[in-house]
Image: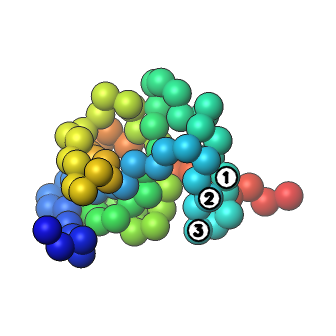
Amino acid sequence: MSTNHQMEAIGEHVIVKILDGEEVTRGGIVIPSNAQQPPQMYGKVLSVGDEVASRKIELKPDDVIMFHQQGGQIILVEETQYRVLKVDEVYGKVQKGEN
């Protein structure tokens, strides 16, 4: 099976790659593994459906978001976990702190 998978969210859905362990986001935010315990999880946005923007919700690829561990539908592709979430299941974005 090819390792090049392109997934595109439709409607009011968001596709995220589950972040596990200590992962560093593009913005330099370190998410320790103990911060990923229930009830929230973290994911890196891969794709945002076209109806999300019409609801005036600003999500874009590479954003890191929080959502409930039971939220969405799990998709497993070559041992990598993804979630397809409804935009209403997203708690919020993780912002890089400014000090």
Q: Quadrant of residue 1?
A: bottom left
Label placed on residue 24: 2
Residue 20 on image: x %, y %: 49, 45
Residue that lies at the very extreme toward the front in this rendered image = 1
Q: Is residue 56 above or below residue 31?
A: below
Q: Which residue is mark 3?
A: 26
Q: Quadrant of residue 16?
A: bottom left
Instruction: Report the side of 5 relative to 31 (left or right).
Output: left
First reached walking from the N terminus: tag 1 or tag 2: 2
Q: Amino acid at mark 2?
A: Val
- Tag 1 and tag 2, C-beta contact below 8 Å: yes
Q: Amino acid at mark 1?
A: Val
Secondary structure category for the residue under label 1:
strand
Q: Residue at x 53, y 34 (%)?
A: 36
Q: Which residue is mark 1?
A: 30
Residue 37 on image: x %, y %: 52, 27
Residue at mark 2 to residue at mark 3: CA–CA distance: 7 Å
Instruction: Report the side of 52 relative to 38 (left or right).
Output: left
Q: Residue at x 40, y 48 (%)?
A: 18
Q: Amino acid at mark 3?
A: Arg
Total marks in image:
3
Q: Quadrant of residue 57?
A: bottom left
